[in-house]
Amino acid sequence: MVVPHVDRALLVSVEDSLGVAIDGASVQLQKDIFDQTKTTNSLTCATPGQAFWNGLDGGIYTLTVSKAGYTTSVGTVDVSLPWQNQSIILLPETP
């Protein structure tokens, strides 16, 4: 089995309050001039409700996760270790 090389990788898992993966969420990662948005369960990450980045520069990034019908989550993530796993829980919007 070949294990891929990861260098400052970030895996973001997006779930609802019951722990069910949310597909189709927009996950935006920003730092200085780096600004990239991925969609959960896209071709880059086959596991439902996840988005993945590899080869990131170290430092503090802003992480914004949104999907229609849910409140937007905005926070920071410190990408200083070779591997980071960030879990985000989106709550339903209240009418």
Image: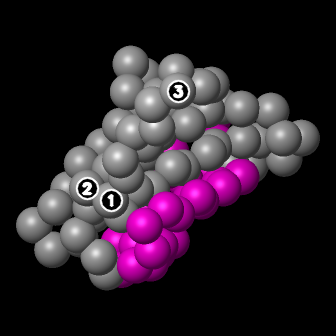
SS for tag 1? Answer: loop
Q: Where is residue 92 in the image (x, y as percent from the top left)?
A: 74, 43
Q: Residues within 10 Å of mark 2 (few under 14, many from 20)?
A: few
Question: Disc number at residue 42?
Answer: none
* Residue for point 38% across, 27% down: 44
Q: Where is residue 42 in the image (x, y as percent from the top left)?
A: 42, 22
Look at label 1 and name its amino acid. Answer: Asp
Q: Name the residue under label 2.
A: 55
Q: Considering only order in the chain, which callout, 2 or 3, is on the residue closer to the N terminus?
A: 3
Q: How crowded is mark 1: few (under 14 residues within 10 Å), some or many (20 or more)?
A: some
Magenta stretch in the rendered image: 60-89
Look at label 2 and name its amino acid. Answer: Gly
CB contact under 8 Å: marks 3 and 1: no
Q: Name the residue under label 3.
A: 1
Q: Name the residue under label 1.
A: 7
SS for tag 2? Answer: loop
Look at label 3 and name its amino acid. Answer: Met
Q: Considering only order in the chain, which callout, 2 or 1, is on the residue closer to the N terminus?
A: 1
How many numbered discs? 3
CB contact under 8 Å: marks 1 and 2: yes
* Residue for point 31% across, 80% down: 59
Alpha carbon separation for disc pair 1 and 2: 5 Å
Is residue 46 visible to the viewer in this orientation of the structure?
yes
Q: Does the magenta stretch include residue 19?
A: no
Q: Considering only order in the chain, which callout, 1 or 3, is on the residue closer to the N terminus?
A: 3
Q: Is residue 87 magenta?
A: yes
SS for tag 3? Answer: loop
Alpha carbon separation for disc pair 3 and 1: 19 Å
